[in-house]
Structure formats: structure tokens, C-alpha cells
């Protein structure tokens, strides 16, 4: 895995790997893509309903979290709210297996999405994205006051959504520290093509 630190208003954050090694446009919305192991597993899970990849991805996360000093002190893993409705939500399922193995509560109800933010997919302007996200999230209560939580998601892009959620957790949830872990982030050279493909699915 090509682990990368993620900078933001959280205490510490990481992406476990890149999404792809390369992605070359073939025209007509098609790409010749070479995935990392994590990227391939997530692609198979989300877009080909290969649910055997849940265990594969959970294993990657568990192995990584066992290298983090904060892991034994985490009070909860909080998956970010899903943007697309699926019968089986990949992020929730992976988080559930990670939490069970590491003996950490996985709380899928705590974070509340108050606004539809699907339009973000078409917006590149950072300030406009921030305006749309302002006030988009809330928490159910203050059950994690002065505690440590980890936000978990699959794909890290600009971090705008993550920063808004973190701000909510600190301000409304009164948590002590927010940590973030994502399965992957795009490669520097193929970011636009990756997101064009993702947004068509």
C-alpha cells in the first residue's frame, strides 16, 4: 500500500493507497485503467457487486489501523453518509468488519446529512463547494463529547466534505479528536479521468 497522510482540520488522516497507477482515456467515456490492489478491490465491490471484496478491503484497513498508535484509544468509527443509495453500502460494510475485528464501535446513525450535496460532483470551484456544504451535516447527540473518533470513507478527493464533517464533529459533537482514514485517493496524473469515470457510475 502507498499510504499518504491527509492534511486538514482533523488531528491526523491517511489514505491507504492510490486509486489507480494509470488511467488513459480511450474516448467515448472509456479508459484503459491500471488499478492498485486497493483500487481494484473497491472498483469490483462498488461497480460490479463483488461482495467478496468487502473482506479484502477490511483486511487492508485492519492491517493499517494496527500500525496506528491511536487505534486502541478510538471510541468510535463513523462512516461518512453515503451519497448514493445502495442495498448494501460498501463503506458501512467494511467499517463494520473493521470495528468488529478491532473491538471499536461503528456508529452509522450518529452523523446526519441535512442537505442534498449531489451537485458537488459537477463543481470544481472550491469556494462554491464550501458554500454548498456549509451546514450540510449535524450529529444525533453529544455521545462522543471529549472522545476520539475516526471518520471512514472510500475515496478522498479535495477534502472539502471531510473538513465540513470534522468541523461539525468538533463544534456540535464536542469530540476531543477527529481522525480520518480513506481507502484511496486519486493519482496526481489521472485525477480528472478517474472522477469523470466515477461520476458516470
Image (spheres, rainbow, N blue to C red):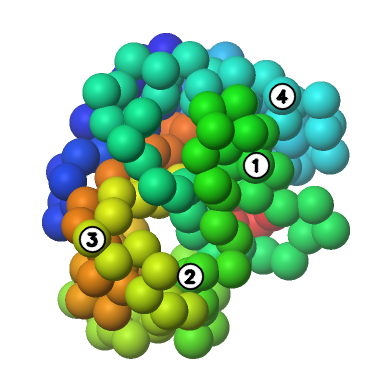
Residue highlighted by disc 1: 96
* C-alpha gap between disc 2 and disc 1: 16 Å
Q: Which mark is residue 111?
A: 2
Question: First in sequence: mark 2 or mark 1?
Answer: 1
Instruction: Between residue 141 and residue 196, name the one nearer to us.
Output: 141
The answer to whether mark 2 and mark 3 are in CB contact below 8 A is no
* C-alpha gap between disc 2 and disc 3: 16 Å
Callout in the foreground (2, 3): 3
Instruction: Between residue 170 and residue 141, name the one nearer to us.
Output: 141
Q: Which mark is residue 55?
A: 4
- Whether residue 25 appears in this view of the structure is no
Q: Secondary structure at mark 1?
A: helix
Q: Secondary structure at mark 3?
A: loop
Question: First in sequence: mark 1 or mark 3?
Answer: 1
Against 5, residue 59 (above or below) is: above
Q: Could you classify mark 1 by the number of other residues whose Cα lies within 10 Å: few (under 14), some (14-19), or many (20 or more)?
A: many
Q: The C terminus is located in which quarter?
A: bottom right
Residue 85 appears at what percent x and percent y? Answer: 73, 66
Question: First in sequence: mark 2 or mark 4?
Answer: 4
Residue 56 appears at what percent x and percent y? Answer: 67, 20
Amino acid at each position: 500500500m502507498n499510504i499518504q497522510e491527509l492534511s486538514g482540520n482533523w488531528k491526523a488522516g491517511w489514505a491507504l493507497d492510490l486509486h489507480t497507477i494509470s488511467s488513459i482515456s480511450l474516448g467515448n467515456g472509456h479508459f484503459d485503467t491500471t488499478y492498485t490492489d486497493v483500487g481494484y478491490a473497491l472498483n469490483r465491490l462498488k461497480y460490479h457487486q463483488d461482495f467478496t471484496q468487502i473482506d479484502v478491503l477490511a483486511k487492508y484497513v485492519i492491517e493499517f489501523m494496527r500500525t496506528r498508535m491511536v487505534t486502541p484509544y478510538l471510541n468510535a468509527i463513523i462512516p461518512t453518509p453515503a451519497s448514493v443509495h445502495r442495498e448494501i453500502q460498501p463503506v458501512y460494510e467494511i467499517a463494520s468488519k473493521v470495528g468488529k475485528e478491532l473491538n471499536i464501535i461503528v456508529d452509522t446513525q450518529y452523523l446526519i446529512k441535512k442537505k442534498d450535496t449531489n451537485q458537488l460532483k459537477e463543481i470544481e470551484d472550491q469556494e462554491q463547494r464550501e458554500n454548498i456544504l456549509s451546514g450540510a451535516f449535524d450529529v444525533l447527540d453529544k455521545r462522543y463529547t471529549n472522545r476520539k473518533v475516526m471518520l471512514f470513507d472510500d475515496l478522498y478527493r479535495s477534502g472539502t466534505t471531510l473538513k465540513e464533517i470534522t468541523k461539525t464533529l468538533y463544534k456540535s459533537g464536542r469530540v476531543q479528536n477527529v481522525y480520518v482514514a480513506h481507502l484511496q485517493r486519486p493519482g496526481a496524473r489521472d485525477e480528472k479521468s478517474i472522477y469523470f469515470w466515477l461520476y458516470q457510475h
